[in-house]
Image: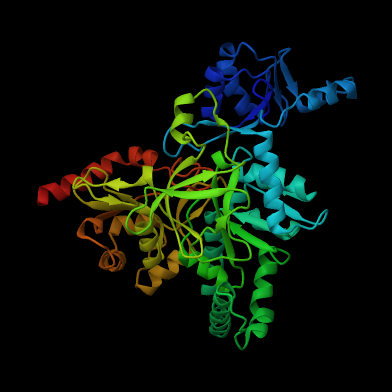
Amino acid sequence: MWMGLATGIYTTNSPEACQYVAANCEANILVVENQKQLDKILKVKDQLPHLKAIVQYKGEPQQKAPFLYTWAEFMKLGEDVPNEQLNAMIDSLRANECCTLIYTSGTTGNPKGVMLSHDNITWTARVASAMVKGDSDEDVLVSYLPLSHIAAQMVDIWVCLSLAGTTYFAEPDALKGSLVNTLKEARPTFFLGVPRVWEKMQEKMRGAGAKASPMRKRVADWAKSIGLQYNYSVMNGEDAVPWGFMLANNLVFKKVRAALGLDRCKYCFTGAAPITKETLEYFMSLNIPLRELYGMSESSGPHTVSIDEYRITSCGKVIKGSKTKLENPDADGNGEICFWGRNVFMGYLNMPDKTTEALDEDCWLHSGDLGRHDEHDFLYITGRIKELIITAGGENIPPVPIEDAVKAEVPIISNAMLIGDKLKFLSMMLTLKCVMDDNGEPTDELTPEALDFCRQHGVTATKVSEILANKEPALYKAIQEGMENVNTRSTSNAQKIQKWIILEHDFSVVGGELGPTMKLRRPIVVKMHQEKINEMYAVATDKQ
């Protein structure tokens, strides 16, 4: 994470950011997490003429140097500083000055330093706090995302300060499985989960359900049907409560919420990446409706939010005091989503050309995302301009809806990535659901849900490698049928998937295929598997 003033204190856990600071920033003090991060900074220290000190806040530096400090040593330096000096520094701050730098994830190019002002931060935090109607001193949040990410910084730090709430910090391996332990301990009153967090919860609950007795399965299925009906009624503003809801709530819903640590949660949010309708409906069926929100680093986090009013697959309505418009909409109303408001950033650090690309003359922020509004002004994200696949025939195809449709059709699939830019037809790379190890790396072992899918199709394999080695006919047939079902809903032949392959390993943050919020890093995945892609299209060309 990087925080501070333009020439102040910065912290980092990103190797890309280390290189960026060497070229662009005038950091006086750098705060690093551990020895590994310290080693990265020391490699470029000669390129940092303004650097006075490096602080390592976990453990002690292995090297000895007058500019290296432990966290305890760093804290002692301030003991003799008079309050008058501190107050003078605080008084010198201005609302329109840079408060924090948030580096973009780099999923579509090199990371960029997003400059957010004090006004950006404080205004957005106050608006967000007012929307959730927090109870002062009583609200609890759980922090698990890297604080280099705008969602974590805004919610875990600034909104929590605005609410006078309490933030619980999860274990470092939160996204590898321990997050639920922190949730059960903290019992947050609000929780923002990235889609992969909700998907992992869904997979584990389905895996547990597959092992339940027939009677428990019937009860759970009945309760979930009631829960889905009830939450659709609430979403549509209807007062009718289905018969049996209170019983289902006592038998199933309350227990599920308690098991997940969400029994006190007033709102469960999802954002930072696309989420499937299947996952949304799954949690609706458990009486845990997920409210989608949408924004970006450049908008200080949230720009549209679903609170009391929501629509499934919509990311809500624009926050009070801001505006949204759709630039150059097509016949279906899909246009580029543009933001305006006090949450819109100052610009990119030392990148005036990129700033001009993002902000037009009227200070509208161009998101690069495609969306549409319904008749009630709910915003729906329909694609991303930079992610659009433009085939050799000139057809513009948003990949996410097709990828989500394939994953919904074939439950054994973990990740699906559509290929076809500048190519004659569409193909897809697939990964199978597998167990992740303690380091967050994919193993060869299939998940319980994947094993259940295999058993349903008469396949005894327990490992990804076994499926690939044997090219299990029944499983490959099931996947092909799922592809064909998706293709029947295509609006043109150009949008049909012609070929697909299964990769040896699932995508992960550790492997580099996913960003910190589990967003697919498409250019990197293409580069990693370029040889397989070439083979797939070469075989198709040979056959033609």
> On screen, 379 above or below 214?
above
Residue at the image point whose x is 35% and y is 69% from the top: 459
User: Which of 477 and 120 lies nearest the eye of the viewer?
Assistant: 120
In the rendered structure, the answer to whether residue 152 lies left or right of residue 449 reads right
Residue at the image point whose x is 25% and y is 57% from the top: 495
In the rendered structure, the answer to whether residue 22 lies left or right of residue 399 reads right
**Total number of numbered discs in the rendering:** 0
How far from the left and from the top, in percent, is residue 16?
Answer: 51, 28
Mark yes or no: residue 2 visible: no
User: Which of 12 and 127 lies nearest the eye of the viewer?
Assistant: 127
Rendered image coloring scheme: rainbow
User: Which of 175 and 365 lies nearest the eye of the viewer?
Assistant: 365
> On screen, 479 above or below 5?
below
How far from the left and from the top, in percent, is residue 371?
Answer: 43, 54
Residue at the image point whose x is 85% and y is 26% from the top: 87
Residue 499 appears in which quarter of the rendering? Answer: bottom left
Most extreme residue toward the bottom is: 243
**Quarter that holds the N terminus:** top right
User: Which of 99 and 339 lies nearest the eye of the viewer?
Assistant: 339
> On screen, 514 above or below 52?
below
How far from the left and from the top, in percent, is residue 501?
Answer: 29, 53
Residue 146 appears in which quarter of the rendering? Answer: top right
> On screen, 417 above or below 37?
below
Mark yes or no: residue 119 visible: yes
How far from the left and from the top, in percent, is residue 305?
Answer: 58, 56
